[in-house]
Image (tube, rainbow, N blue to C red):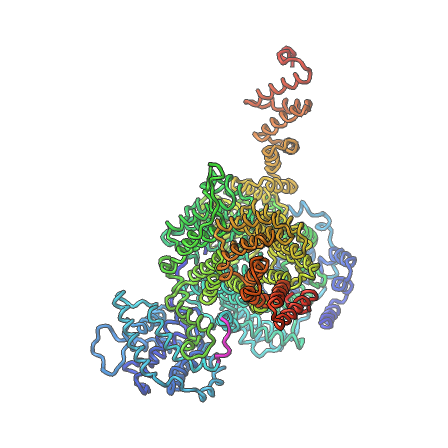
Amino acid sequence: MAGLTRTAGAFAVTPHKISVCILLQLYAPSAQMSLPFPFSSISQHNRLGFYLLSLTKSCDDIFEPKLEDLINQLREVGEDMDAWLTDHLTNRFSSLTSPDDLLNFFNDMRGILGSLDSGAAQDDQIILDPNSNLGMFVRRCILAFNLLSFEGVCHLFTSIEVYCREAHSSSAQYDESNDNLESLIQHDQMDMEKYIMDKATEEIELQKNASGRVPFHLHTPEALFKVTEGLLVTRKEKSRTNTKKAEATQLACASSSTVDDTLVDESLFLRTNYQIQGFLMEQADAIETHGSSLSSSSIESFLQKLQNLAPELHRVHFLRYLNKLHSDDYFAALENLLRYFDYSAGTEGFDLVLPSTGCSMYGRYEIALLCLGMMHFRFGHPNLALEVLTEAVRVSQQHSNDTCLAYTLAAMSNLLSEMGIASTTSVLGSSYSPVTSTASLLSVQQRVYILLKESLRRADTLKLRRLVASNHLAMAKFELMHVQRPLLSFGPKASVRHKTCPVSVCKEIRLGAHLLSDFSAESSTMTIDGSLSSVWLKDLQKPWGQPVFSQESGSRKSSTFFQFCDHLVSIPGSVSQIIGASYLLRATSWELYGSAPMARMNTLVYAALFGDSSSSSDAELAYLKLIQHLALYKGYKDAFAALKIAEEKFLTVSKSKILLLKLQLLHEHALHRKPAKLIHLPALCDHLVYCLKFIHSNFVKSISGNLKLAQRMCNELGGLASTTMGVDMELKVEASLREARTLLAAKQYSQAANVAHSLFCTCHKFNLQIEKASVLLLLAEIHKKSGNAVLGLPYALASISFCQSFNLDLLKASATLTLAELWLGLGSNHAKRALDLLHGAFPMILGHGGLELRARAYIFEANCYLSDPSFSVSTDSDTVLDSLRQASEELQALEYHELAAEAFYLMAMVYDKVGQLEEREEAATLFKMHITALENPQDEEPNMA
Amino acid sequence: MEGERSSDLLDLQKSQGRGITEFSSIFFCPTPFNLSRAAASSAMVSKESCRNEIRAAIGQLSERCLHSAAKWAGEQLVGIEQDPSNFTPSNTRFQRGSSSIRRRFSTNESISTPQPSVGFSQAATPLPEEDDVIDGDLYHLAKSYFNCREYRRASHVLRDQMSKKSVFLRCYSLYLAGEKRKEEEMIELEGSLGKSDAINRELVSLERELSALKRIGAIDSFGLYLYGVVLKEKGNETLARASLVESVNSYPWNWNAWSELQSLCTSIEILNSLNLSNHWMKEFFLASAYQELRMHTESLAKYEYLQGIFSFSNYIQAQTAKAQYSLREFDQVEIMFEDLLRNDPYRVEDMDLYSNVLYAKEACAALSYLAHKVFLTDKYRPESCCIIGNYYSLKGQHEKAVMYFRRALKLNKKYLSAWTLMGHEYVEMKNTPAAIDAYRRAVDINPCDYRAWYGLGQAYEMMGMPFYALHYFRKSIFFLPNDSRLWIAMAKCYQTEQIYMLEEAIKCYKRAVSCTDTEGIALNQLAKLHQKLGRDEEAAVYFEKDVERMDSEGLEGPNMLEALVFLATHFKTHKKFEEAEVYCTRILDYSGPEKEKAKSLLRGIRMEKTGFPSMDMEHFPL
């Protein structure tokens, strides 16, 4: 009852196992039984053997197929003798009319096992080796039956009745489907099977030699069975290839097919504790991967049933907590979390608890605190989260649970870094001793750094590979975003040089990726056991032949392939998730350092390889990056099209970043398309700012594109973002950056400059060095646009120096462009200098810059040439025209009418000078077109808002 | 159904002859005004009619093998004051001294003056017996099978009988057979994970049959009761409630139906939404429902009213004791239980409550006496085990206590108080995870059990997780917001050095004070907290209040001294010399270093008052 130790459930006899036994009897008839031997060929016999082997494997799964399913599978295995097989099966069942028959049946089963020492078997008799997989299965069944009390036998008997009754009710309809079977796999079937047979025996032999006995969970020949399964299942799958859906639904089907049944106790058989734990773990992964797109109610009803079956299985509460967490039900999540830990004391089902440390008298409530802290974090209560995590630190120190401490520190640093600013000095100072002495002196970033280091150190000594890897990633993220400084500098400030170090970022990412090679050290046997066995069942349902035979789309195929590999080496989902995250981080770092193709490539790698196993928020981020890339390099039309797809996929996910992206895109688009109607833009911008604030200050649960709601709410909530606590600084910075840009586009220079100034101050205050660089650039732009080039120059130069020390190459290139523009603004005598600057930055701009940047550079180049007094248009017109043509093409894709008009204007002028009247006219009309488009923007709204 | 009921009523009136007015006033009283009138009239008149009603009902109930309902009715029948018509010596012996308390509390006239309604002794059966003769023999056989607990056999005997009574008994025995099998299966199927999907397999067919019968109207109130029970088991609570309401409206004497109904009333809203006809049985129902909903004063009022008729009912006395226990009137409860045991020495029901009282009063001998007695009466009752557990707990033998609580839980898995008590034992044994598990089970059985929530909070606090514990304290306070102990526990949690949220602690203590904190911790703590935060004005206010409280309760001690010292210095620094002097002189009553301090304070005061140097003071006679 209230005890803490619970033994694993035993191997129980079920009707399904009895059917397997019956089939085994057919496969290896004992000498006494004079059954007709209907196998026409050895291969047919082997085929049945393989099928049985895979059945015995999947017998350890949580779900058992019904008789009906079994008969269907038999149909495909048995080919021409399927009728005989099924007949025999059903007859055998119907001959079990009393408990005594069951007793006799199991007595007979003994006969098919060869005894270990008797060598005097008849030649043609097939004898199961008692140590083989099948033999072990039979022995276990017999043993389990013998252990049953009479009541147990009675219960088994009634469940057999139900098992048969269900099959009878629905078996009639399948008879006609037999006729139109295609003999797709007739060819080279024999060879294939022989090959498999050899391989399998080889494998089994190998296993035997290796371990001295055949383990029941024989993992290695799994791949082979998949191939067999592939052969077996194709015919059936042919008919339903097109009905296949995404992974999520497949999984949902797997569980809901049983859920939908009204009689649970017949379709759901409880298995060993380990199997259930493994299954639940898998479900937990699924919940995380699919987020709230997975129907929470179906999981809920499934969990309800599981709980009815096994009230002492407290892991169910944890699953329910996860489910509620992802469907944003705070109270239910909290309730279930607490319940789980109250019941299990944190000792059930957590594989991070090493058995050697043992569960003491005290339970493991520090894990409860850790989970609670993460939950509060997710629901947007950073203060509460911090309090709870602090308590977790204390309790894990008290119970000297270093593992938990390492995780808690990591969670804490994550919290701090996400939260940005926090008044955490008191909390940290009072509780965490290593930091106490210095806490008050440190900024949040430095504290994050210390926490990370501490966590990393512990994880390293404890050999928690996953944590080490994710800590490395966190560290890389930190190094990427924050300027490294000596932690405690007592000397004069001037000696401290601010800079980022791409090398260390790279190093951290690489260290993180080491995980893949040595993940096996940590992954506990339970995880693998459990998840693999349910893979077995899925294999029975899944078309494994597809990669070979189908003509599916490429992307699907690749993911299936990877899934295949995934199962082959059985990488735990969490590991591949971390690896995936490292790719995303790589993409981000390349983005910052200014290599667009590298960023895109890494994102694509992520989306292609890890998309299936990633959590929904990571996948969303990848989509976001790709769409941003599209907008920058392919224009808005493509980006919006992609956005549509992404929206469908992710808008159901709460707190969707996609919405944010949409707002950003709309804003950019509006800035480009209609500067003439800028009167409306500040409104839009305000709207955007408010929305940003709104989203973050309130962690809107189900905003799901409902902008109207946001608009209505934003007035009330506008003030909320002003408190610095718990607000995402990045978002705030982004919002005001956009505000300034809008004002700039509306030609309200002084306001724009004001906003930018205050933004710069904010950045400085909160130590956001990288943002500073772009704000400086913006200030330079503002002064350039306002015609005050002299004022703009220092800003541009400062920006460049910032970029240089932080290795922001692309930003530096665009700052250089601005600098050149400012020089030219000082007068045409500076054209030469400007051109030199531009040419210096050209490789970077052309290689990695977005459409806008490139077009700007081209036009500017032309401008330079034209204003250079030493340059003669008539002789060198092609240099100018080439770049103008390039620019105009790119601008059209962007729908950036203002710049496009400028390009065409210049073009027309040059043509005029050169005397090519026809081309001049053409350019002039295009110019006119863009001007009109600029002045009266059509209603080609992207209808996104 | 309305028609049917009124036809029943007609029969009733016919057979009663003269009792028309009384009954109509009981059955049809649409307004509260009428209700009070009806209540008054029933108090006046119906002592006799009640008796007759119950007498008839007992016959009908036991005829249908509703034994526990018959038992209940029998208890109430005897609980009515002695019938003067058959006043026999044996009866008087039975009732003599039955309630010294009662005699003390109850009004004189209700006992001594004979009722004017002697003529109502003829009042007939509540429901006419039907078709006794037709299937009488088979019915008798079935009944005896039933009484021998051979339920399936009983239902088989009645398989072709169509009378309502036979149908009821058949269904009822089928239901019980299913329940019995279910219990057995539960043990047979018990796996490592506590598999408990055993269900009563008769429910489906029973529901089908009963609903069919109901549709054609061939169902009596007993059938409706059974239907309600079946529906409740199937999880269809609203329908079950409707069916039970219908049943008790047409036949109110079946206490089983009422208690089923009561278990379905989980909130006051549900209770108020029930459309119940007025009858004195309804009062019993309401009283017990109020008690379950923790509305103890309302419940007490009801019981008091009922005691006017059922002056000697052990049941009412026990229930009153229960309510008083919840109001923590332990002395009174003890007297009541002693009384109860005198009248009914072999009673086991509710005795666990008595043991709790004895435990709280640390009456070892009495508790062991009680434990011995119930042990001899029936050792396999969860109550008995619980009492023995309590005894061992009081003796400090926690392992044994746990063993007995475990046994109690084996006998009844949903025995709430055993879970909670077991949690307490584990806390004593410092096995917090086990304690938490036990408390959590109690909470999952009844989420309103504030004791278990409190226990959870305490356990977590013990483990040094005060922040985590706060949630549980909050929960417990939610269910019992007027208990100062809970508020103080929460405040202490806030006060721990790990959290150290003193403002919140102050708020909690304030609530505790407003809930009349009997132990007087809150005021003292409030004062100290304010002192700690440097708010001397507030601190002085609370110290003064605390002194006042201690004065009124005649308490002395270090707290008093501390308060006095603070107040004296405080008033002195604020130049309120009169007050300061008062407190200083009070301190002089104590010995120790404070006395010297008081003296020097006094000196200082006089000096400041008069401007004389202190040396001169010594020469003045005090």
Residue A112 is at least partly visible in this image: yes
Q: Compared with residue A11, is residue A443 higher up or lower down, i.e. above or below?
A: above
**Occupied quadrant, residue B262:** bottom right
Where is the C terminus of chain B found, in terms of image quarters? top right
Residue B373 is at least partly visible in this image: no
Quick one: A867 or B143, which is closer to the camera? A867
Residue furthest left in the image:
A120
Where is the N terminus of chain B found, in terms of image quarters? bottom right
How many numbered dots are placed on residues in this image?
0
Start and end of the magenta stretch?
A240-246
Q: Compared with residue B453, is residue B547 higher up or lower down, i.e. above or below?
A: above
The picture places residue A899, in percent across and down from the top left corner, at 62, 62
**Occupied quadrant, residue B551:** top right
Left or right, A597 with respect to A794, comes to: left
Residue B100 among magenta residues: no
The picture places residue A199, in percent across and down from the top left corner, at 29, 75
Left or right, A293 with respect to A204, comes to: right
The picture places residue B89, in percent across and down from the top left corner, at 63, 53
Quick one: B585 or A797, which is closer to the camera? A797
Quick one: B531 or A497, which is closer to the camera? A497
Q: Compared with residue A616, is residue A365 higher up or lower down, i.e. above or below?
A: above
Left or right, B256 with respect to A611, comes to: right
Quick one: A340 or A566, which is closer to the camera? A566
The picture places residue A848, in percent across and down from the top left corner, at 50, 61
Left or right, A300 with respect to A33, comes to: right
Residue shown at 66%/31% (left/top)?
Answer: B537
Residue furthest bottom in the image:
A179
